[in-house]
Amino acid sequence: MGLFDDRDDKTEPATAKRLSEARGKGQVARSQELSMATLLLAAIAILQAFGPALSKFLEESLESGLSLEVPSDPDKDWALLLLGSTLAGIAKVLLPLMLGLVLTSILTGLAQVGFLITFEPLKPNLAKMNPVSGLGRLVSLKTFAKSIVSAGKLAVIGGVLWWNMRDEWPRILLLSEIPFSEAASIVAEIIIETLYWIAFPLLLIAIGDLFYQRWQFARDMRMSKQEIKDEQKSTEGDPEIKARIKRAQREIARRRMMEEVPKADVVITNPTHFAVALKYERTEMSAPTVVAKGSDRTALRIREIAAGAGVPIWEEPPLARALFRGVGLGEEIPPRFYKAVATVLAKVMELDKEAATR
């Protein structure tokens, strides 16, 4: 595998299904550099806000430790009490820092990938233990990009430390000659200033890394045209099978339609190209209903079944064409056809009466 192996067969953007499956496995575009940079900025802001309290606590702890009166016979209860009070003081000072960092981490994660809980990354993956694939990962574009980011971070941190220490070194050398509280304030000031100078360049690097991670993720998720076809088959079904199912469904619907022809009151024809079978039951229908219709061979079959069942066949080409095109199967005819259909039904009934009197 080359450093910039592009996998030429995978040229298509990932489908929504592939992205959803990847997300379920915890595979998302996420920059760890951005998380670290925001955590650093949050830590600086919290330290700046609670720095006086922390400095005061350290000063009081030091004074308390130096002036601690140890009983002549210290026991376990005294030791536990001392430990408890010390831990309580530490927790009181550090709790805002811990809560702030946890909240920052959660918000940064939500901003990058949204709400996502998955345990897939915790499952053992034997493929990652393969030395061949491991060697491939060592000489990949991802590794090269990580190396560039790491080198950039080291350059930023080293440059900022050198720049700040060059100007602050005289003050640092005088710390041993001034009171502790003043020295602590100076040290805190130098640390916070230095961290700020480090954090903002790192944030810019992290934002660049985020865009790179999203580009890299989209590239890794790309699919070949064959993979997209296979996915469509698995989700929507094989096109050939779907076509066979549709043909079978049409055939079933056609047979059911033909079963209704013997129950019709009249079949209106073109006479050869169209045939529409109508049925009218006054107690159940508000208007005559199309129970069967067809063109060409289907029309011929409707006429054959009608003739065999003794259903009247009436040739009325304009009406047959209009009914075929304007009324769906199983629908009642619209009012514009009432007069024409009523005329046909009346003539058919008249013919039936004449036939009955013979």
Image (cartoon, grey):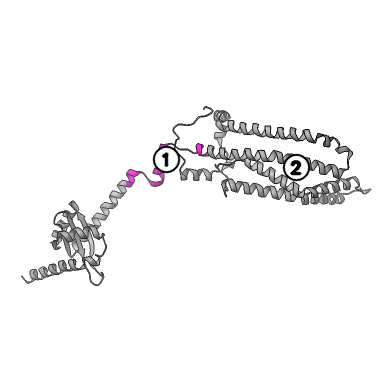
- Residue at 22% x, 58% y is 324
Residue 265, compared with residue 145, is above or below; it is below
Q: Position of residue 320 (x, y in %)?
A: 18, 59
Amino acid on which disc 1 is placed: Ile
Q: Position of residue 52 (x, y in %)?
A: 80, 49
Amino acid on which disc 2 is placed: Ile
Secondary element type, mark 2: helix
Farthest front residue?
Answer: 167
Task: Give the Cα distance between marks 2 and 1.
Answer: 53 Å
Farthest top residue?
Answer: 2
Q: Please give the range of residues in magenta.
A: 216-242
Q: Kindly indicate the quadrant of the structure image that contains residue 346.
A: bottom left
Dominant secondary-structure state across the stretch colored magenta: helix
Residue 90, compared with residue 206, is above or below; it is below
Q: Position of residue 122 (x, y in %)?
A: 59, 42
Q: Which mark is residue 184?
A: none
The answer to whether residue 41 is left or right of residue 260 is right
Q: Is residue 298 visible?
A: yes
Residue 333, compared with residue 160, is above or below; it is below
Q: Position of residue 132 (x, y in %)?
A: 55, 28
Q: Quadrant of the C terminus?
A: bottom left
The answer to whether residue 49 is left or right of residue 273 is right
Q: Kindly indicate the quadrant of the structure image that contains residue 341.
A: bottom left
Secondary element type, mark 1: helix
Marked residue nearer the N-terminal end (2 or 1)? 2
Q: Which mark is residue 228?
A: 1
The answer to whether residue 246 is left or right of residue 114 is left
Crowd rating for badge 2 (residues with CA inside 10 Å; few <14, some 14–19, many 20+): some
Q: Which mark is residue 192?
A: 2
